[in-house]
Image (cartoon, rainbow, N blue to C red):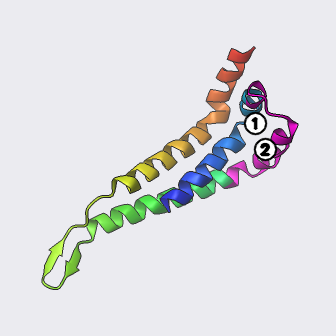
Amino acid sequence: MAGTGAVVGIGALVASSCCVLPIALAGLGATGAVFSGLAFLADIRPLLIAGAAGMLALGWAFFFWRRRRPSCDGDTCAKPGTSRRTIGLLGFGSLVVGLALVWSPYIEPALLKLTR
């Protein structure tokens, strides 16, 4: 779940960067073929962000649900340990989705001002 949320969140971030990303890619020497692949992502940006946020919410819910439920084997019960990789992926995915949400209204205008 965490990996899916992170991947979809990266897609939402790419979709929300419709103006600055092509300028950066052109600066790196990318051609028009790269830019044509980004156009369809802008149309489905809200769906990508909603899907990523939903998957991340589900991932966090499963993480905390599993963490509270003790693991019982016979007469002994132990709390399951936390996985740093799970926390890292969920945190990274949440950061990317949050960045995708604020990219268009706040970050992109500031970056476009810097390029002028």
**Number of the front mark, 2 or 1:** 2
Q: Quadrant of residue 52?
A: bottom right
The percent position of residue 27, horizontal first and vertical second, equals 75, 24
Residue numbers of the magenta segment = 25-47
66 lies above or below 51: below
Disc 2, disc 1: CB below 8 Å?
yes
Q: Is residue 99 left or right of residue 21?
A: left
The percent position of residue 23, horizontal first and vertical second, equals 76, 27
Q: Residue at x 62, y 28 (%)?
A: 107
Q: Secondary structure under badge 2?
A: loop
Q: Quadrant of residue 21?
A: top right
Q: Badge 1, how many Cα within 10 Å: few under 14, some, many 20+?
A: some
**Residue 38 shows which numbered tag?**
2
Looking at marks 2 and 1 on the same chain, the residue that comes earlier in the sequence is marked by: 1
Q: Badge 2, how many Cα within 10 Å: few under 14, some, many 20+?
A: some
Q: Secondary structure under badge 1?
A: loop
Residue identified by numbered label 1: 18
Q: Residue at x 59, y 53 (%)?
A: 7
2 lies above or below 27: below
Residue farthest along the left direction in this orientation: 75
Q: Quadrant of residue 83?
A: bottom left
Label 2, label 1: how far apart the Cα atoms are: 7 Å
Residue kind at label 1, given as amino acid type: Cys
Residue kind at label 2, given as amino acid type: Leu
Q: Nearer the viewer, residue 57 or 84?
A: 84
Q: Residue at x 62, y 55 (%)?
A: 50
Magenta highlight on residue 60 = no
Q: Residue at x 85, y 43 (%)?
A: 36
Dominant SS type (magenta): helix
46 lies above or below 27: below
The percent position of residue 86, horizontal first and vertical second, equals 40, 56
